[in-house]
Image (tube, rainbow, N blue to C red):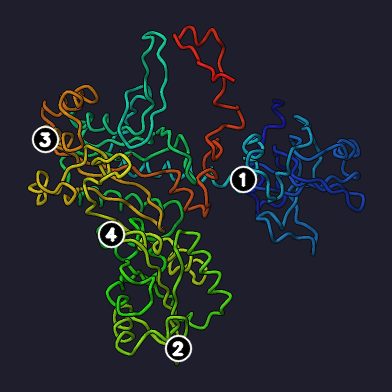
Amino acid sequence: MRKEFKRTDYCGNFNIKDIGRYVVLNGWVNRRRDHGGLIFVDLRDRSGIIQLVFDPQCSKEVFELAQELKNEWVIGVKGYISKRPEGSENQKISTGEIEVIVDKLIIFSKANILPFNVNEDENIDEFIRLKYRFLDLRRPKLQKNIELRHKVTQEVRRYLTDNGFWEVETPMLTRSTPEGARDYLVPSRIYKGKFYALPQSPQLFKQMLMVAGIDRYFQVARCFRDEDLRADRQPEFTQIDVEASFVDVEDILSIVEGLMYSIFKNVLNIDIQIPFPRMSYREAYLKYGSDKPDLRYNTELYDVSEIAKLIPFPPFQDREVIATKVPEKGNISRKVIDELTESAKGLGAKGLAWLSFQEELKGPLSKLINEGILDRLKRDTNLSQGDLLLFVADETGKAREIMGRFRLEINKRFFQPIAPFIFTWITDFPLFSFSKEENRIEAEHHPFTSPKEEDIPLLDTEPLKVRANAYDLVLNGIELGSGSIRNSEPSMQKKILSILGIDEEMAYKKFGFLLEALSYGAPPHGGIALGLDRIVAIIAGEESIREVIAFPKTQSAFCSLTEAPAEVEEAQLKELGISIKRKEE
Ligand code: ASP
């Protein structure tokens, strides 16, 4: 690069105080306009945009060169910062009051016509965006997201370091970690027929670091999970992974609250309220039909099954009937009710019953409801004049789950959130759950989570009733992360594994190294992992984590840029001792 064209400043950082300075700038041609004998170019770099002016009176030669410039060419310019003529200011950009009168220009490189415009926010097919991610990333919105991610990551490092945590890297080529997903496997060339697994999380290593006396660990850890394709999952993602020794639940929650406070304060200059409110898993499920309630809306669910039995309406009989209230929306039109019914059905409801509580009752149920029933409904759901009450009836559990999701749709449709960010802890999760598909008990979090002390006696008798020392952090209805206090006692760890159907022989085969480590003096320890991608996406106001990851995969786990996964050379397979069986045509 020519030394004389090394930039003195970034484009977006100037303001009127810089008027009169002679500067050198480098960047991309965002747009060129020829107007009134002058050429105007918006020059863009990662900091923003500034207007360049090419005037033939200033330099004929430079003006002629500028006539060739096209979008996305990379150039260097020299010139004086000057005030824009009265009336030609641009309020939309931070440098809108000034421009650069250029007297020197160099073209560093030319650009082919782009597959899409990067200087406009247009709707581009995601496959194309990801195929040309290096262009997509030029767009200011994505540049901001990448910068935000950087800032959040650095704040995480700073806060945790200041609080005594050491950043330690754990292996990528390892053995399976049970986090409930499939592993990505990497074949070994040296040990033919054997495979490494990419980590689903650093769980086992961080626990061993505690046994090793590292005391407080963190890692900005890449994790790999080969899950079925679900909305907004990536096969590889990043966790802020934390573990600490000699701690209880309170310690971990307050470390994380401090971390979140610092991120919001130091990156966004927003004061969030800490400590965060806490809610038991059971309360969340009963009130919101979900273990990640969105508390930006204050409506709840009400179990009205008992009252509903008294209403002579066949779909309500012998069913769980869950109601939710839509405050002050009693007067919505029939058409809107029909739309709501359709969206409830879209969530799996068999139908939607409704009651509008105005001067008089309205809705198909109104004729079936006597005063006694109405009084009970009013009392149980805190109903006020003008409210709308919606009901879904189904099998036990199902109605509540449907209503949980429906509650969100209703709120998003009718109401503004009461605050932009609402955190909550969900605690007291069950230690186990029963998988109907697999017909066996599974770990609700993972097998290393400890039971609550007072529930230990239930382990032998009613394991599904045992609550765990586990916690989830939820922000705006999105789970940011989970953690737990672990089983630091080998005997308790073995017991939990045996309840999960993993006998001692199998346990030693799968994670004997952890069980062994625990037997050499393990401190009580616990931790958490928080999804970095999700935190940044929420702060950036993005719907998808793909918008805050530099090179994400498509929703079908494909990299349209590198076209991975891809076939490999026969020779490479041979070296690995692998042969591919092709499906018979
Ligand atoms: N390993 C857990 C996970 O990835 C987090 C934890 O328990 O710390 O979800």
Residue at image mark 2:
358
| Disc on res. 47 | 1
Mark 2 closeness class: few <14, some 14–19, many ≥20 residues within 10 Å:
some
CA distance for labels 3 and 2: 61 Å
Q: Are marks 1 and 4 in contact (CB under 8 Å)?
A: no
Q: Secondary structure at mark 4?
A: loop
| Mark 4 closeness class: few <14, some 14–19, many ≥20 residues within 10 Å | some
Quarter holding the C terminus?
top right
Q: Secondary structure at mark 3?
A: loop
Task: Say which label, 4 or 3, has the lower sequence index.
Answer: 4
Three-letter residue code for mark 3: Glu
Q: Earlier in the sequence, mark 3 or mark 1?
A: 1
Q: Tell me the SS state at disc 2.
A: loop
**x and y percentages locating residue 220 in the rendered image:** 38, 36
Q: Can you identify the residue that label 3 sits on?
A: 489
Task: Report how far apart the C-alphas of labels 4 and 3 lie in the structure.
Answer: 30 Å
Indicate the position of residue 550 as horizontal and vertical percent values: 54, 37
Query: What amino acid type is highlighted by mark number 1?
Result: Ser
Camera-near label (1 vs 4) is: 4
Give the camera-side residue of 353 and 82: 353
Q: Earlier in the sequence, mark 1 or mark 2?
A: 1
Q: Secondary structure at mark 1?
A: loop
Q: Looking at the image, is mark 3 or mark 2 nearer the viewer?
A: 2
Q: Answer with mark 3 or mark 2, whichever residue precedes in sequence.
A: 2
Q: Evaluate if marks 4 and 3 touch, with contact meaning CB atoms under 8 Å apart.
A: no
- Which residue carries the number 4 mark? 275
Image spot of residue 202 (x, y percent): 32, 32
Which of the four quarters of the rendered structure image does ligand 1 lie in? top left
Q: Badge 1: how crowded within 10 Å, few (<14), some, or many (20+)? A: some
